[in-house]
Image (cartoon, rainbow, N blue to C red):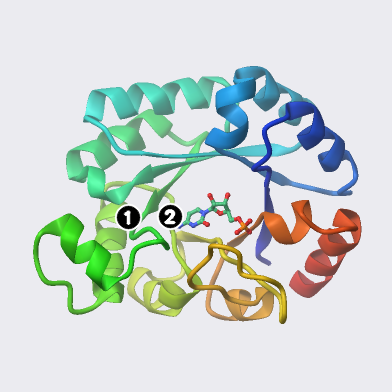
Amino acid sequence: MAELIVAFDMPSGRDALLLAARLPGLKWAKLGPVLFVREGPPVIKEFRQRGIQVFLDFKWHDIPTIVAKAVTAARELGVSMATVHCLGGRAMLGAAARAAGQDLALVGVTVLTSHDAAELESVLGRGVPDVGFEAERLARAAIQAGLRGVVASGQELGLLREALGPEPWIVVPGIRSNGEPAGDQMRTISPADAVRRGATHLVVGRPITGASDPAAAYRQLVEALG
Ligand code: C5P
């Protein structure tokens, strides 16, 4: 069964923890720059003490030594999942995977959901006939380097599940039920479709954190994952 990850993209640790307390059975909290840059490691500890696993989403992309040290620090803080960017290259991915060991699941971001073919062409400096092909190429590199899985939009999900086989985790953001506002997400997918196409983890932020009744929105999603 796919697992639900709630993205706590708010500036206050206190608000994040108050919200988490309203979501019974929550297994995963995704913490990124919005919260972590303000609150730092203590907020990770607070989530851990409540039995909630932390997914630290910084999409690291730097020289191998630096990324390996960042991954080690995350592992030592008790982080259970973290992201690196596949464009960091094979040496960086390998160093990060070795630093993660068995305790931390490292997942690779392939192509940002804010990039379309034209934007990716301007970044890479060459023609990109197919974004899916680029995502698949990078995803294979991530798994070959020893990562536990990848982050993918609903659009590439089916393609990547077929290319990678059944084992790797595929973490999917941009989850929206029918009629929910997409916000700045370009490629959205419903929870049921994401599960059907092979997602192992669904990342949901604003549909829960911005709902008038976050607990009800959370409950509905848990039920949809069944
Ligand atoms: O609020 P919403 O449900 O759109 O939140 C999506 C979360 O997933 C955000 O925390 C965002 O950083 C993250 N994410 C994403 N697209 C990616 C990788 C991560 O939207 N490619």
Q: Quadrant of residue 17?
A: top right
Residue at the outermost left position: 126
Mark 1 residue type: Ile
Position in image of residue 149 (x %, y %): 43, 55
**Which quadrant of the frame does ligand 1 lie within?**
bottom right
Mark 2–mark 1 CB contact (< 8 Å): yes
* Drawn side of residue 45 relative to residue 55, left or right: right
If you read the primary sequence from the N terminus, does the residue marked by circle 2 or circle 1 appear first?
Answer: 1
| Viewer-proximal residue among 63 and 167 | 63
| Badge number at residue 143 | 1
Q: Is residue 181 above or below residue 100?
A: below
Q: Which residue is mark 2?
A: 149
Q: Residue at x 71, y 76 (%)?
A: 177
Q: CA distance from mark 2 to mark 1?
A: 6 Å
Q: Residues within 10 Å of mark 1 (few under 14, many from 20)?
A: many
Q: Is residue 137 visible?
A: no
Question: Does the numbered disc 2 mark a residue whose Cβ is under 8 Å from ligand 1?
Answer: no
Q: Residue at x 74, y 70 (%)?
A: 225
Q: Residue at x 27, y 61 (%)?
A: 140
Mark 2 residue type: Gly
